[in-house]
Image (cartoon, rainbow, N blue to C red):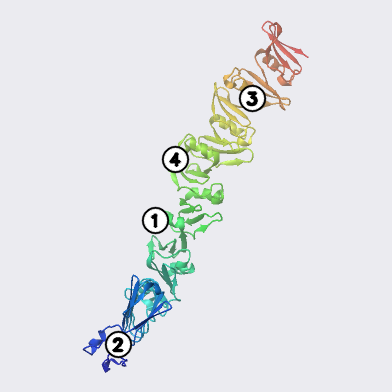
Amino acid sequence: MFRRPSTLGRRSAPRRRNAFVPTAVGAAALEVRQVMSTASLVSGVLTVTGTNNADSISVVESGSTITADGKKFTTSQVKSIVVNGLNGKDTIVVKSTKPTTLNGGDGDDALTATSGLDVLNGGSGNNTYPNTAALDTVVDPVLTAGKKMAKAVMDKYQALGGSAALGTPKGDQYATGTGSWTFFPNGVTIAYSTTTGVHVVSGAIGARYQDLAGPGGMLGFPTSEELQNGPARVSHFQKGSIYWTYDTGTHLLYGAIRDRYAALGGATSFLGLPQYDQVTQSNGGISAAFNGGTLLARPGGGAFVIYGAIRDKYYAVGAYDGPLGFPTSDEMSVGPTRMNSFEHGSIYWTAATGAHMVNGSVLTRYLALGGPSGALGAPTTDVYNYAGKGSEEDFQGGRLGAVPGGSAFWVYGAILDKYRSLGGITGRLGAPIADEKSDGPARVSHFAGGSIYWTSSYGAHMMYGSIRDKYLALGGAAGWLGAPTQDQRTYSTGEVLTFSGGTLIAPLYGGPAYVVYGAIRDKYNSMSGINSPLGLPTSDEYQGSNGYRVSNFQHGRIYWRSDTGAFVVYS
């Protein structure tokens, strides 16, 4: 070693074989850097140790060789590297993929490492860490307040004023394979990852973030600094966002809800501010309420927005736990209505009709008929389900009804008015089994328990049972009986229905219906019909002997011939 001038205040050291003696001494000699170290490999640990002088130590990995102190070592034999600087103003540079520990001395050292797996322990001097990998760990008595801190985090910390501005770290860094973060007082977190860069989270948002374990929690690393979003402040993270206002506090959004809210403009959108953290439901779906609406997402699905009267109706019928399930569309315009579709139905709204739910076979038929743009228009009631009877729903243009498990059919106009007066699906007719159609001069709707026929001459009238069956067998309103002129009537012994061309009569408790018409009907009616001594008919009118037309009854017959007229023979 060379002996420095006494003005340096350094003690001399023994001269080594690789010592370099300068030709000049004095202040200029302080800038001289030279290799003054020893290197050895023991049990896979490559150790390089400097001297008490101003050392320049370089360890470089190149392919299969690592060179240190002029010595070459086989890369595969080196598991880790330790470099020890001593009391001089050392410059230590390690360029290797091996995890390295750099220990500075008491001088103003410059320590560089590049693997991202390194630990750089600065000494008591004013140290620098040029070109050090962002994820390498630095421990410096001044720059990191003696705590372990990623290089990128340390640089941000110092740029923000260090301990004078942020206080001392709460502890050593937390780290993953691709990132590192440090918690500071007052809710400040500085975090770095290879995919997001370095960001600061602070204030009320930062305090909430720390409560959620920072990058080690559900949100992951920050992807932005705190931003202004309309009336709110927001910080975005890999897996969510935290919004804050003075009035509402902090609220957490993540996953599909966060993504959709941000796409709509966040707090600047019509949804406004979140009212609370998003909630995971028992069925795995998620929801979040905002001042202007609600975002909901089924498990694994996208988020959709509902608001206003449709949202009110949705929650009134049980929301995601009700018959509709989760939304599958945003609110949209369809014909004259606003609507949202859901997993198991839809809600339609107009100012005139309000919001109403449509689902099941009723919805299927409604859409087939053109939905709100079709003849039915908007719904005016919800779907009502009746155990054992079926379902029905009213619309501006009629009613759709269905038997249990069956298709829905359309009832409207005068027939619907009659149907409603008879109790609808809960009345004796039950659910419709066909759409209204023409039958001769009449319009007809068939139901599970009967039929309603309508003509402009006679209005709408009901029939059922064996009378309906016989009427249809005779051709219905297109047959010779014509249209019914009144409802089917019940007497103590039987059922009666009068048509323009005759009368059908059936026993009260079952049995076939028979037709009575013409002069024989006139005679029978003049005797009080089924309340007469003849009782109920037991046959249709038929051709008898001697040119007579005959109808049989329980207690006799009525005969008719043009020359005799109608007369009774009792049995």
Residue under label 2, please give it: 17
The amino acid beneath tag 4 is: Pro
Q: Is residue 63 left or right of residue 372?
A: left
Residue under label 3, please give it: 469
Residue at position x 58%, y 26% from top?
453
For marks 1 and 3, the one nearer the N-term is: 1
| Element type at mark 4 | loop
Tell me if residue 448 comes above or below residue 194 in the rendering: above
| Element type at mark 3 | helix
Return the residue found at the far bottom.
Answer: 6
The amino acid beneath tag 3 is: Asp
Residue at position x 45%, y 55% from top?
256
Circle nearer the viewer, 4 or 2: 2
The location of residue 150, given as percent across then percent down, is 39, 73
For marks 2 and 3, the one nearer the N-term is: 2
State the CA–CA distance, disc 2 to disc 3: 124 Å
For marks 4 and 2, the one nearer the N-term is: 2
State the CA–CA distance, disc 4 to disc 3: 42 Å
The amino acid beneath tag 2 is: Arg
Residue under label 1, please give it: 265
Q: Which mark is residue 336?
A: 4
